[in-house]
Image (cartoon, helix red, strand yellow):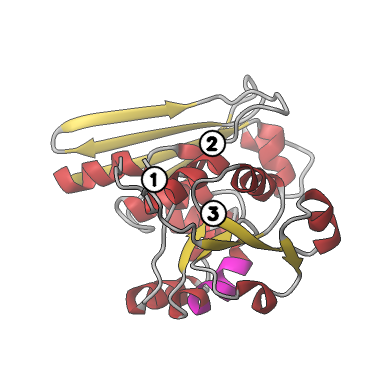
Amino acid sequence: MPASGAARPACVLIGLGRIGEAVARALTASSDGPALSAIVTRTPDRAKALFPDVSCYQDLDRALGDAEIVIECASPDVLAGHGPRILAEGRDLVPISLSAFAGTGGPALVAALEKGPGRLFIPSGAACALPLLDVARCAGLDRVVFRQTYPPALWARLEGLSDARAYVGTFLSASAREAARRFPRNLNAAIGVALAGLGLDRTEIELIGDPAIANRRYEIEIESGGAPIRLAIGPYGTEPDRPDHTAASLLSILRRRQARMVF
């Protein structure tokens, strides 16, 4: 339930890939929630053709203006490079490239977050589980295991290989920090789970290759207060028009930011 009569805060979107475009389409189609004032992308001409009523830039400085919210849908490098400055300026930051927290820019992001005055709103992403983890943490969180399953050929392709035999079954068991170093652009859901739960070094990550699935599957196993919890998501289908949980979770957290009734 949005705040009745409240002015719509301006927001800037960084990145116009698959998720960024889905978010931009939803924001421009809605009269509730933030108003999309600008898009920052490497291809502003393409962005302008898609969203003619939105200002489009390559340069973040030109886009920010009086925006209250910055949505990051670009890359871990972009989040690490611009996140501290955005938070220091008092803007709210909604990122999806959470692997930045496990990289060399992670300490600067954490320091900027602690100093403020901007706030960080972390969407659940494809794992859809951060509110559940927050509840479990309040009850006492003992163990978190996050399993991410792809077809073996996809894991191999992410590492520039054609032979997928090494990626069948569980091929990596590591902390969230260690796993993200190996796949810095592909474990954002896992890093979100770690940030919401036991942290980057105590959250256990298992990466699995399953030849029987065509897309992705996630599983979260939680031990909290003597009550085990297991959540499975997927496997996802391959339909090009299927709903995107990452984009949907980002839109959900934007809605909750200004709602009077918060779930």
Disc ID at residue 86: none
Q: Nearer the viewer, residue 63 or 125?
A: 63
Q: Position of residue 172 (x, y in %)?
A: 51, 44
Q: Amino acid at mark 2?
A: His
Task: Tell me the kind of residue under disc 3.
Answer: Ile
| First-in-chain label (2 vs 1) | 1
- What separation in Å lies between label 2 and label 1 (alpha carbons)? 21 Å
Residue name at image x 51 percent, y 79 percent:
85
- Picture quadrant where residue 150 is located: top right
Q: Callout 2: 10 Å neighbours few (<14), some, many (20+)?
A: some
Left or right placement of residue 38 versus residue 139 in this view: right
Vertically, is 4 above or below 10? above
Q: Residue at x 30, y 38 (%)?
A: 132
Residue 70, magenta (yes or no) = no
Residue 174 visible in the snapshot: no
Q: Which mark is residue 245?
A: 2
Alpha carbon separation for disc pair 1 and 3: 23 Å
Spot the residue most to the top.
212
Q: CA distance from mark 2 to mark 3?
A: 12 Å
Q: Secondary structure at mark 3?
A: loop
Q: What amino acid is labelled 1 in the image?
A: Pro
Q: Which residues are magenta?
A: 78-85
- The residue singled out by tag 1 in the image is 2
Give left or right: position of 126 versus 143.
right
For mark 1, does the 10 Å Cα neighbourhood hold few (<14), some (14 to 19), or many (20 or more) residues?
some
Percent from the top left, x then y, of residue 215?
64, 29
Q: For the N terminus, which image quadrant?
A: top left
SS class of the residue under badge 2?
Answer: helix
Which dot marks residue 96?
A: 3
